[in-house]
Amino acid sequence: MSFSYQLQATDGAARAGTLSTAHGDVPTPTFMAVGTAGTVKAMTADAVRATGAKIVLGNTYHLMLRPTAERVARLGGLHKLMDWPGPILTDSGGFQVMSLAKLRKMDEAGVTFRSHIDGSKHHLSPERSTEIQYLLDATITMVLDECTPHPATHEEAAKSMQLTTRWARRSRAAFTPRQGYGQFGIVQGSTYADLRRDSAAALTDLDFEGYAIGGLAVGEGQAMMFAMLEITGPLLPAQKPRYLMGVGTPDDLLGSIARGVDMFDCVMPTRAGRTARAFTSAGIFNLRNARFIDDDTPLDPHCGCLACSRHSRAYLHHLFRCEEMLGPILLTQHNLTYYQSLMQGARAAILEQNYLQYCANVRAGWNSVIPREGGGSTTS
Amino acid sequence: MSFSYQLQATDGAARAGTLSTAHGDVPTPTFMAVGTAGTVKAMTADAVRATGAKIVLGNTYHLMLRPTAERVARLGGLHKLMDWPGPILTDSGGFQVMSLAKLRKMDEAGVTFRSHIDGSKHHLSPERSTEIQYLLDATITMVLDECTPHPATHEEAAKSMQLTTRWARRSRAAFTPRQGYGQFGIVQGSTYADLRRDSAAALTDLDFEGYAIGGLAVGEGQAMMFAMLEITGPLLPAQKPRYLMGVGTPDDLLGSIARGVDMFDCVMPTRAGRTARAFTSAGIFNLRNARFIDDDTPLDPHCGCLACSRHSRAYLHHLFRCEEMLGPILLTQHNLTYYQSLMQGARAAILEQNYLQYCANVRAGWNSVIPREGGGSTTS
């Protein structure tokens, strides 16, 4: 089984395809549930499967600290550990080192930091990040990159992107090719079209199995993010998957698919589920709101998940009011199901050459504009 | 469908039977998972069913405060609300008023108290407790009683038991008979054989559908608890179910079944599951213990639950170490499954007239004595 992406249909720039891996196939567009420390928070693996998820994401930063990559390898790899025989993508660890770790020191070699948990000292280099992901048995390995902060001057962004490019080369050299496994490069370049072009060109020379678009959804706004996708998409090989990292709201996903993105990950549906926020076909609800106290209707009548098919909004409200764990459990399952159904609907529409109409229908269902975290418009 | 108990076999004083109710049958001995506020903590209703549970318990005190009995009734009853069409037993609320509520004032009429949540004022009388349980649609309603504190003098215990008897009469008068629904009286009398006898005699005169034994497991020790069961059991009608309230460890359950108890409830398996303590065929483990960090074996090789069939001790240890919700979720499911399998094994052994051997085999499996909360020996 070789690692491959089969493009099955396009509708404008939107793509429907199938990613084939050593751990199974993934129809695209796809949303990867985030399984930070070897578990999608509040979910059993069966519950994750029930949402329709085909691939999950693991965080190298968290896993290298606990239980450690070497221990995961001794225990048979991340698939076995978390009861997820399907594909797993792991990030490089770089993003969370920058956002979570203490006393970071970055240079050409890599980044030295102290754990946010116990202050222990660690080093992450392109080679070590790649080795960790090998030990975790990641189906898809990400190169170590620097997620350029926003805003950045052209000079800062160029310098950062060039470091990412050099690290991508070292990550590629450190990667152990295995049948059905792949490694993705990460396009950086901030909000500068010329840098995005340079980055894409340098990375495609390294012939990765797929390409991520990084450094977006960091405060630049949805319109700028979409503009960068429009520039970057055509620079990437059509027969390789494209992954937009850390995005986003349902509206972000629809607009990004329209611009050629195949894969997404985001903590939004899981994190929102733990804080009583529900993504539904009628928009976003906060289930702590007192207006749900006597609401005997299902959260989303168009959803077949456990929360919607067996319980009322009043019950979900009650659970959050009492701080019962079942509230986060049911709402995480709902939100992930909603995200997966959005992906399934998008894929079906692309296959039927009907994607723009699908987006219009979905958006019409939302009672109000769903605000993107950090603002931004909702134009497609 | 009438509410009935069919005694199918006895082995010594141990009993195997079937409780038939409006909401389905319950093979006995049975353990009722505690669903405090309309949810068995950390469990979906499907997960509770997967443990083998046939009946769950709801707490009147918690439910009368949130979401309130009237609201539960408007929302279609507790069965519908929590997706549990099976039998539900509710307690009277009295025990938790005494242990949780603020500024309690008790008199002949009942008890006035302030909510531990928001300080709001409430009144619970035998009539109101019975009405609340009616509104909740409890399959089995408990009479309001006073759980006599331990230790108590003979005079204190007598006075308390007599109040419970008067309240039982008022609760019985307030109960609305419905096909397949029942109401249980509660035998009190502290550690005094004569008071237990008086209590049982007065209650059986009221002809309840079942009888609970209350005021035990409150610090008197296992030996005294067993002695009281030996005195009380023969005083109760053989064709009615017997429920030992708030008990206990696996060893308590084995010993109590040997003394004629049919039904149990306890927060122990669920609470322990949230704090990393596992009940297993080899005894009690604390999964936070560092000795599990590299332990690739199943928690309990004799258990078929999700935690044991899909994951390792090392993974469970990791989840608790990272404070991931999946730790409590998986371990609660395991502990409840262990309790249910203990009940299933006991029932099968009683039907085969082999109960003492079953107890000996189970106890031999425990590496060490499983201490009962609050001490006590482990003699059968």
Image (cartoon, coloured by chain):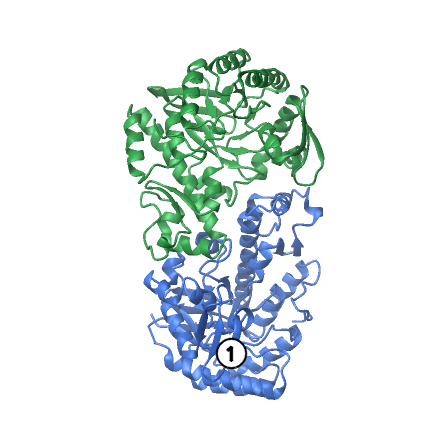
Chain colours: A blue, B green
Q: Is residue B18 visible?
A: no
Classify residue A271 by image quadrant. bottom right
Q: How many labels does the image show?
A: 1
Q: Is residue A256 visible?
A: yes
Q: Where is residue B230 in the image (x, y as percent from the top left)?
A: 40, 18
B121 is higher (above) or lower (below) than B199: below
Badge 1 marks a residue whose secondary structure is strand
Q: Which of B154 and A259 is in front in this view?
A: B154
Q: Which residue is drawn at 48% across and 26% down?
A: B216
Q: Which of B108 and B134 is in front in this view?
A: B108
Residue, disc 1: A105
Q: Mark 1 lies on which chain?
A: A
Q: Which residue is drawn at 63% across and 43% down?
A: A318
Q: Residue at x 49, y 30 (%)?
A: B246
Classify residue B176 by image quadrant. top right
B107 is higher (above) or lower (below) than A157: above
B379 to the left or right of B199:
left
B66 is higher (above) or lower (below) than A279: above
Neighbours of disc 1 within 10 Å: few (<14), some (14-19), many (20+): few
Placement of the N terminus of chain A among the 4 image quadrants: bottom left
Q: Where is residue B345 in the image (x, y as percent from the top left)?
A: 34, 32
Q: Position of residue A173 (x, y in %)?
A: 38, 82
Q: Which of A36 and A298 is in front in this view?
A: A36
> Which amino acid lies under the numbered mark 1 shown in the image of this protein?
Lys
A81 to the left or right of A286:
left
B263 to the left or right of A269:
left
Placement of the C terminus of chain A among the 4 image quadrants: bottom right
